[in-house]
Amino acid sequence: MFKPVRRALVLLATSFACAMAAAQPYPSRTIKIVVPYGAGGATDVFARTYATELGARLKQTVVVENVPGAGGTIGAQRVMDTAADGYTLIVCTGIEFEMLQIADPDSARGRRTNLAPITLIGTQPMVLVARPALGLRSADDLVRAARARPGALSLASAGPGTSLHLAGEMIKKASGIDLLNVPYKATPQMVTDLAGGNVDLALLAMPTAIPHVRSGALVALAVTDSTRSAALPDTPTLGESASVKGVDTKVWYGVFGPPGMPASLVQALGEASSAMLRDAAFREKLLGMMITPAQQGSASELEAVRTAQLAGFLRALGTGGR
């Protein structure tokens, strides 16, 4: 009974906000970027770098708010219920809402997958890591150990529907192994539990994994990209293993707005982001975070990457995956 009223109020607020926005130059006040994960992770670090640069380009304050939980969908839902006036945005790194729709077709949250695409900033491989005490050194080692003890090894993830979780499901499907999925709200806790021996394995974004691999706190088994990373040149790709084939997936960093954002606002934000990608200093910052910069940073480029990732997951997983 209350949901139709709530939606009507959001639409009314959006219409009013858009009318007000048309009457004054954009942006005229602080812009908020929602990060749907905890502080300290790779997405949070990227978002704060992007926010600083966006603020300089638009000559306006841009702040970051962490809204973790439910694999990123709580933060995304908050943005979807916000007026589409360009003052609340979200950084996404995967297809959380689409996968929620597949897992639960009756979910109102899952059906509403119409966040407004603004820009693709870049992509980044993931790293499959293990705690050293397991004695694993490769993806093939993992497959042998998992087949010897089905369901005994635990795989930490950033929550159902996230890129990290889905990459794990793809590995399980491709190799025919059974791993116990353990979801986390924030990456730092995941890494702490890995180092402490509370979980066995994880898929981590490259910049999160690197320092722990180099220190010996974690062992890198494979990267999820189709080519080896210059940051971990001795770590093979999953495709190089004999036991895991057909897994080639990445984290992508895209910026979205609420549904119904006016084209003028999408264009203004997209142009600012494209200008960043043409700036050598900003590109160097991205490369320092192991992010490969996008070509144009356009909304259409973002949609193409998102659509391709969803198709790849569906081919590998169907509608299942635990």
Image (spheres, helix red, strand yellow):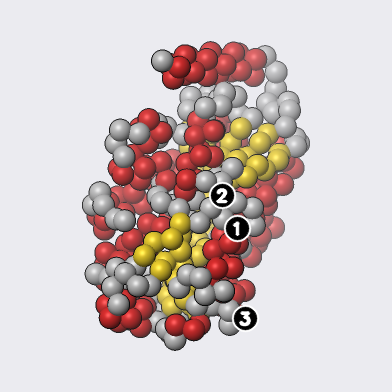
- Front residue of this view, candidates 107 and 263: 107
Q: Residue at x 64, y 53 (%)?
A: 39
Q: Which mark is residue 215?
A: 3
Q: Residue at x 72, y 32 (%)?
A: 30
Relative placement, left or right, of 176 versus 219 is left
Relative placement, left or right, of 71 versus 270 is left
Q: Amino acid at mark 3?
A: Ser
Is the Cβ of the residue at disc 1 closer than 8 Å to that at disc 2? yes
Q: Position of residue 102 (x, y in %)?
A: 30, 42
Q: Secondary structure at mark 2?
A: loop
Compared to residue 197, the image places residue 168 above or below, namely above
Q: Secondary structure at mark 1?
A: loop
How far apart marks 3 and 2 lie (CA) works out to: 25 Å
> Which quadrant would residue 64 be assigned to in this image?
top right
Q: Which mark is residue 41?
A: 1
Compared to residue 208, the image places residue 49 above or below, namely above
